Image (cartoon, grey):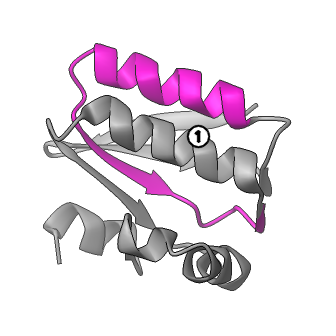
Amino acid sequence: MSFEQRQEGEFTVIEVEEARLDASIAESFKTFAFDLIENDKHNLVVNLSQVRFMDSSGLGALVAAFKKLAGNGSFSLAEAQPAVRDLFDLTSMDKLFTVHDSVAEAVKGS
């Protein structure tokens, strides 16, 4: 499972370096995100530029990380591909998550 992190100012960008965020890696993603949060990384941007497919397990992992912050920081998504954006729309997750067109927009908060 391939996840990387990098700092952009006060934001921690999680790079999902997989084509699928599904049941096979959702738990690993959740653990990775939880570890960041527990280590005082409270402004997270998840870069989904490489993710071409996401299932309910992937959505659940994103929701779990969002809830783990419990309002103590920010959690946004960036560069979601069309199929992933469609999933957010169909499941109304676009109302929960802010999805930015780029990581640069996400760290600016625009």
Residue 28: % across, % down = 67, 26
The answer to whether residue 17 is seen in the rendering is no
Determine whether, in the image, residue 71 is placed left or right of residue 18.
left
Q: Position of residue 44 (x, y in %)?
A: 31, 44
> Is residue 12 at least partly visible in the picture?
yes
Q: In this view, does 55 lie to the left or right of 97?
A: right
Residue at image point 61% right, 45% down? 60
Give the number of marks.
Answer: 1
- Whole-percent x, y for residue 12 in the image: 30, 40
Q: Of all residues shown, which one is farthest toward the right?
A: 24
Is residue 33 a member of the stretch shown in magenta? yes
Q: In the rendered image, which quarter contains the C terminus?
A: bottom left
Extreme residue toward the front, this view = 91
Is residue 15 highlighted in magenta? no
Q: Which residue is drawn at 56% across and 21% down?
A: 31
Identify the residue shown where x is 50% and y is 58%: 47
User: How far from the left and from the top, in percent, is residue 17?
Assistant: 68, 48
The residue singled out by tag 1 in the image is 61
In the displayed structure, does residue 83 sit left or right of residue 5?
right
Q: With respect to residue 13, does 92 lie above or below?
A: below
**Residues packed near mark 1 inside 10 Å, few (<14), some (14 to 19) or many (20 plus):** many
The magenta stretch is 26-53
Quadrant assignment for the N terminus: top right
Q: Is mark 1 on a helix, strand or loop?
A: helix
Please tell me which residue is depicted at 31% across the width and 24% down the height of the picture.
Answer: 37
Displayed quadrant of residue 49 = bottom right
Q: Which amino acid does label 1 sit on?
A: Ala
